[in-house]
């Protein structure tokens, strides 16, 4: 599912395109995301603007609001295409045309661990077994998380 987000929505920090896409018509309660979710960002820039979208402050701010509102959304993103771009909106990085996105390692460490803690708790509250899915998501970002991390989370430590 591709969610189209206009420049006006980004500038107004308007998440209604996401809300509309994630909430099945006529259903109340927690939004549900079909898999996989991608974003079609319609944020035109001048031809002489060399920045990637993840370097545009207005776009990054919209994604920060999105992430704060839907912290579980990374679980439902297209991990091959959208997850790295999503994380780039939230984590400092550099972009190389040859090597792609190069995240600040410490910032990525913090984001991944924060996300694992948040999503582990959220998935347990939903009655879902999250460990394998969370480990897969972390692996896409270059992390091989041990079962012992999740054992600690389950023990209340």
Image (cartoon, grey):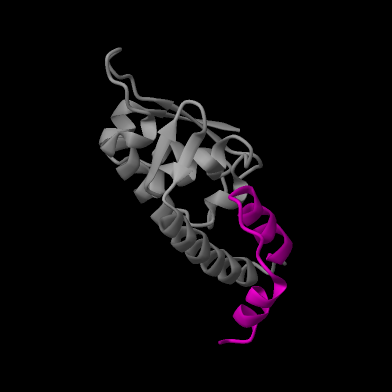
How many numbered marks does the figure carry?
Answer: 0
Closer-to-camera residue (92/76) = 92
Q: Is residue 52 above or below residue 116?
A: above
- Whether residue 54 is visible, yes or no, is yes
Instruction: Please tell me in which quadrant of the rendered image residue 77 appears.
Output: top right
- Whether residue 19 is visible, yes or no, is no
Q: Position of residue 130 (x, y in %)?
A: 68, 65
Quadrant position of the N terminus in the picture:
top right
**Residue depicted at 53% across the width and 41% down the height:** 84
Tell me which segment is drawn in magenta.
130-157
Instruction: Please tell me in which quadrant of the rendered image residue 132 appears.
Output: bottom right
- Magenta span contains residue 41: no
Left or right: where does residue 38 sit relative to residue 90? right
**Residue depicted at 54% across the width and 45% down the height:** 23
Q: Position of residue 25 (x, y in %)?
A: 56, 41
Left or right: where does residue 62 sit relative to residue 32? left
Closer-to-camera residue (74/32) = 74
**Residue depicted at 37% across the width and 48% down the height:** 92
Q: Position of residue 90 (x, y in %)?
A: 40, 48
**Residue depicted at 62% across the width and 42% down the height:** 79
């Amino acid at each position: 599912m591709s969610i189209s987000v206009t420049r006006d929505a980004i500038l107004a920090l308007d998440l209604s395109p996401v809300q509309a896409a994630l909430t099945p018509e006529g259903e109340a309660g927690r939004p549900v995301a079909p898999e996989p979710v991608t974003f079609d960002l319609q944020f035109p820039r001048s031809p002489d603007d060399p920045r990637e979208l993840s370097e545009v402050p207005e776009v990054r701010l919209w994604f920060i609001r999105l992430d704060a509102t839907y912290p579980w959304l990374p679980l439902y993103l297209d991990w091959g295409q959208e997850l790295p771009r999503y994380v780039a909106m939230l984590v400092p990085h550099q972009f190389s045309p040859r090597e792609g996105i190069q995240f600040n390692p410490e910032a990525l460490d913090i984001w991944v661990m924060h996300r694992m803690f948040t999503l582990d708790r959220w998935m347990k509250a939903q009655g879902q077994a999250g460990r394998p899915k969370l480990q897969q998501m972390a692996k896409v970002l270059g992390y091989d998380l041990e079962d012992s991390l999740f054992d600690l989370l389950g023990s209340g430590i």
